[in-house]
């Protein structure tokens, strides 16, 4: 095979990142060091230059490292591999097989856009970090890189058909993207057919903002700014009246509780305050969606999905269709009323890390931030052409017939315990909490049991659950990593078991296939069946 | 696929084709006598452990054990399920035979007990100090001392049970099996778990030995997948030889698709 590759791919020259990348490295470092910088400048103002001196030395080192990195970082695409080399004293030489690349992400903040360059992240299924970060490439280079990765993936999958020794391997491997087509159809694939699957207008984003409470993200930030403003000399006077209002002592709480009949004025203030807070929340949410997803477009290019969006920081992510591990459709309560849904996907790239970057966040967690209910089926079928997505047609199996009873019993026990504790702590009126808790928990138990369903089709495992936000997720049988069946002593008493399906890099979908309260016999049968089909 | 094509021969030094196994896996019934299995040891499940797990336990129904429970009890074993397990042991065995589980090496119970006794010995020894303090403060025939001593004895008995009896029970409730569809592991007495790793999803494997395990010729096999929750499935307490053979079998038969 090596000889074949050598013939097909002649020596490719090494490429460098743009010279402007130096600037970006420095800006990024400055952003990281902003707090020490402020502290240093402040102490310099006080006449202490030690910190400034340290700062200058550190900055010089960072600058030198950036220079070295810039002058030594080289990359090229050759022999079906992306090769990246860098370093002077400690040389690193990294090769990433192109057919192992999971996705190529592109991030452009305002500064990047000014210079028409972008940061490129290339991810494989390994580890938590991107396999290679190329900071920064010009947009032309990016397009070239994407095109050649795409081309090489196509070529390398066709190549074995030429080499007789390799044919068997490919046939056995059953790689879904290539083998579903006849060899004659394959050369057509090299022409990159471009198809816009979905584009979102401002109206869509406004609706998405209305249905979500993303604006809550900004509340702690606003409070933090308010709190921190105490330390900045100029702002103190401006913010202090507001801040004083937030500083609540225990006496204030008693003062705030109205004695006797609350006055009309008090109720009015409360109402207006609530309305203002709600409106602000929704406005913030809309702003968040618009900033994040302005100009959203989902395209199908060949066999790759490409998302591009962003008002200030533009993100473009490329996900090969065959790399999708998990699809999850979320429908919030308000979204259901308006006929809206959102779709999240999981790919193995950058495996489930906690601090995901903007591109990952957009490409997985917010794959399709909002779409009409009528568009869901068509889009999911585009994500995985071999599936038929008719949600009502799946063979949805209810959980164990005792599931509702069990959850209800749990709700009752929890209520009794909480009521006893509350009644003891705030004697005797604390027990009144039970009056609120019991109907709420019983309702929640009823909804939970009603919403949970499990289904399996030829190539899919599906799970549906959710109390307020309904989530429907599917994993593909050819992407199941492990299966787990577990049974706690309680499960045994109720003749139930939990069936869980583990997939790669789970997390962004915020939903997992973990079917609790399944009938034990059925769970065991499903386990055996899934085991059989997931090979 | 290019990479997979290069990788596969490296793990099959005898040069047997990977597709032989793959077709085998997709259709276990077509065991062609003219074309014997290309492995030296075709039936991994049968030869490995001398202890006949399922058979022996079924023979002793008096002990209510997990793999041989009466049919009225809820399951975590398909021995009770109406249809026989459609799965077959690796090597295309008789289809009608139920899944046979291998138990872990019995020596592992000893290892667990030794480790447990070291731990609880230190704990019980340390417990003597407050006991001595109480005894000297209140006198030896005081009710406070009596209560403390009996509490100590109860805790000690509990701890002894945990260190001495629990490993044996755990051993009775743990088993594994390698079939055409992958490696299946079961463990747990109260909280029971049954984990299956499809052969095609095995990324890599580790065989580890601590000093105690080495002393007893045992090992811990860890199977890594690309998954999230169960990205490392551990099988502790195999004999070293079994662990190595199981590892070889897993690596040899892992599929071409990486499943990601």
Image: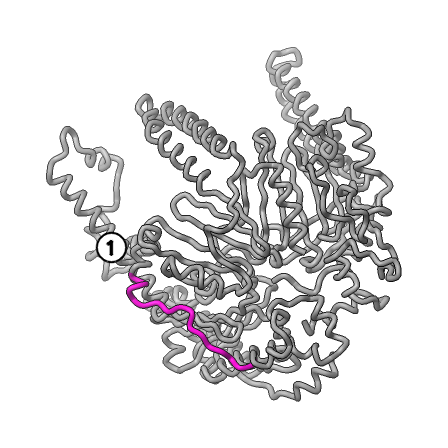
Lateral position of residue B196 relative to residue A27, left or right: right
Q: Which residue is mark 1?
A: A280
Tell me the crowding category of disc 1: few under 14, some 14 to 19, or many 20 or more residues within 10 angstroms, Cα based.
some
Q: Image check: A486 left or right of B44?
A: left
Image x and y of residue A85, in percent: 61, 79
Which of A425 and A288 lies nearest the eye of the viewer? A288
> In front: A68, or B145?
A68
Disc 1: host chain? A
Indicate whether A54 appears above or below B123. Answer: below
Q: Give the image location of residue A68, x and y in percent.
A: 55, 80
In the image, the segment drawn in magenta is A190-206
Residue A224 in sight: no
Q: Quadrant of residue B131?
A: top right
- Residue A232 among magenta residues: no
The percent coordinates of residue A184 (x first, y second) are: 62, 79
Q: Secondary structure at mark 1?
A: helix
- Residue closer to the observer: A267 or A242: A267
Residue B42 visible in rendering: yes
Query: Does A227 appear above or below A176?
Result: above
On the rendered image, what quadrant is the C terminus of chain A found in? bottom right
Total labels: the figure holds 1
Name the image quarter holding the N terminus of chain A.
bottom right
- Where does the image place residue B81, in percent across and percent down from the top left? 68, 37
Residue drawn at (61%, 12%), measured in percent from left and top? B143
Which residue is located at x 51 percent, y 48 percent? A463
Residue A104, relative to residue A229: is it above or below?
A: below
């Amino acid at each position: 095979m090596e000889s074949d590759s050598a013939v097909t791919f002649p020596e490719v020259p090494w490429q460098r990142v743009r010279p402007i990348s130096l600037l970006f490295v420095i800006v990024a470092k400055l952003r990281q060091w902003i707090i020490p910088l402020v502290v240093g400048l402040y102490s310099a103002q006080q006449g202490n230059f030690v910190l400034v001196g340290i700062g200058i030395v550190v900055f010089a080192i960072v600058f030198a490292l950036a220079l070295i990195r810039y002058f030594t970082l080289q990359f090229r695409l050759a022999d079906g591999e992306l090769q990246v080399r860098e370093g002077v004293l400690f040389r690193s030489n990294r090769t990433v097989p192109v057919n192992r690349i999971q996705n190529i992400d592109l991030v452009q903040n305002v500064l990047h856009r000014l210079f028409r360059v972008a940061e490129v992240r290339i991810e494989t299924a390994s580890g938590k970090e991107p396999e290679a970060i190329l900071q920064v490439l010009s947009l032309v280079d990016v397009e070239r890189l994407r095109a050649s990765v795409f081309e090489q993936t196509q070529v390398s999958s066709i190549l074995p058909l030429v080499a007789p020794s390799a044919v068997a391997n490919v046939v056995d491997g059953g790689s879904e993207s290539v083998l579903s087509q006849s060899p004659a159809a394959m050369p057509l694939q090299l022409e990159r057919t471009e198809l816009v699957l979905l584009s979102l207008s401002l109206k869509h984003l406004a609706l998405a903002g209305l249905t979500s409470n993303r604006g809550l993200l900004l509340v702690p930030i606003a409070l933090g700014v308010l709190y921190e403003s105490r330390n900045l000399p100029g702002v103190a006077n401006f913010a202090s009246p507001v801040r004083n209002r937030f500083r609540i002592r225990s006496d204030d709480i008693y003062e705030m509780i109205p004695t006797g009949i609350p006055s009309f004025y008090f109720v009015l203030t409360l109402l207006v305050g609530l309305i203002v807070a709600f409106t602000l929340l929704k406005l913030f949410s809309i702003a968040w969606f618009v900033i994040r997803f302005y100009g959203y477009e989902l395209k199908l290019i060949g066999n790759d999905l490409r998302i591009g969006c962003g008002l200030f920081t533009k993100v473009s992510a490329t996900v090969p269709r065959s790399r999708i591990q998990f699809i999850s459709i979320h429908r919030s309560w308000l979204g259901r009323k308006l006929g809206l849904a959102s779709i999240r996907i999981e790919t193995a790239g950058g495996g489930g890390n906690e601090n995901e970057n903007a591109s990952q966040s957009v490409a997985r967690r917010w794959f399709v931030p909002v779409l009409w209910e009528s568009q869901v089926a068509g889009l999911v079928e585009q994500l995985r052409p071999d599936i038929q997505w008719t949600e009502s047609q799946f063979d949805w199996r209810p959980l164990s017939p005792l599931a509702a009873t069990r959850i209800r019993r749990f709700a009752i026990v929890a209520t009794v315990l909480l009521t006893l504790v509350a009644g003891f702590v705030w004697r005797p009126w604390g027990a009144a909490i039970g009056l609120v808790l019991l109907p709420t928990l019983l309702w929640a138990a009823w909804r939970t049991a009603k919403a949970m369903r499990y289904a399996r089709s030829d190539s899919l495992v599906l799970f549906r659950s959710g109390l307020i936000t309904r989530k429907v997720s599917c994993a593909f049988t050819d992407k199941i990593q492990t299966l787990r069946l577990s049974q706690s002593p309680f499960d045994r008493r109720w003749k139930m078991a939990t069936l869980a399906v583990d997939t790669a890099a789970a997390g962004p979908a915020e939903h997992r296939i973990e079917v609790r309260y399944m009938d034990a016999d059925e769970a065991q049968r499903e386990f055996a069946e899934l085991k059989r089909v997931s090979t | 696929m290019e990479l997979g094509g290069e990788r596969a021969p490296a793990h099959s030094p005898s040069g047997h084709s990977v597709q032989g196994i793959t077709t085998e896996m997709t259709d276990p019934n077509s065991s062609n006598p003219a074309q014997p299995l290309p492995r030296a040891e075709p039936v991994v499940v049968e030869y490995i452990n001398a202890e006949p797990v399922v058979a022996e336990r079924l023979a002793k129904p008096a002990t209510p054990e997990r793999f041989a429970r009466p049919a009225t009890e809820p399951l975590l074993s398909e021995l009770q399920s109406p249809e026989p397990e459609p799965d077959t042991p690796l090597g295309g065995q008789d289809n009608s035979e139920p899944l046979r589980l291998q138990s872990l090496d019995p020596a592992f119970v000893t290892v667990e007990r030794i480790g447990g006794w070291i731990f609880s010995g230190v704990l019980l020894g340390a417990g003597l100090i407050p006991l001595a303090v109480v005894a000297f403060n209140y006198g030896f025939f005081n009710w406070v001392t009596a209560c403390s001593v009996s509490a100590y004895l109860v805790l000690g008995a509990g701890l002894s049970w945990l260190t001495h009896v629990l490993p044996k029970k755990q051993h009775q409730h743990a088993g594994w099996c390698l079939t055409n569809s992958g490696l299946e592991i079961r463990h747990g007495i109260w909280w029971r778990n049954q984990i299956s790793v499809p052969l095609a999803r095995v990324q890599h494997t580790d065989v580890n030995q601590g000093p105690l395990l080495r002393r007893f010729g045992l090992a811990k096999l860890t199977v890594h997948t690309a998954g999230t929750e169960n990205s490392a499935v551990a099988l502790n307490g195999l004999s070293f030889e079994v662990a190595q053979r199981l590892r070889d079998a897993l690596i040899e038969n892992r599929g071409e698709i990486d499943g990601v």
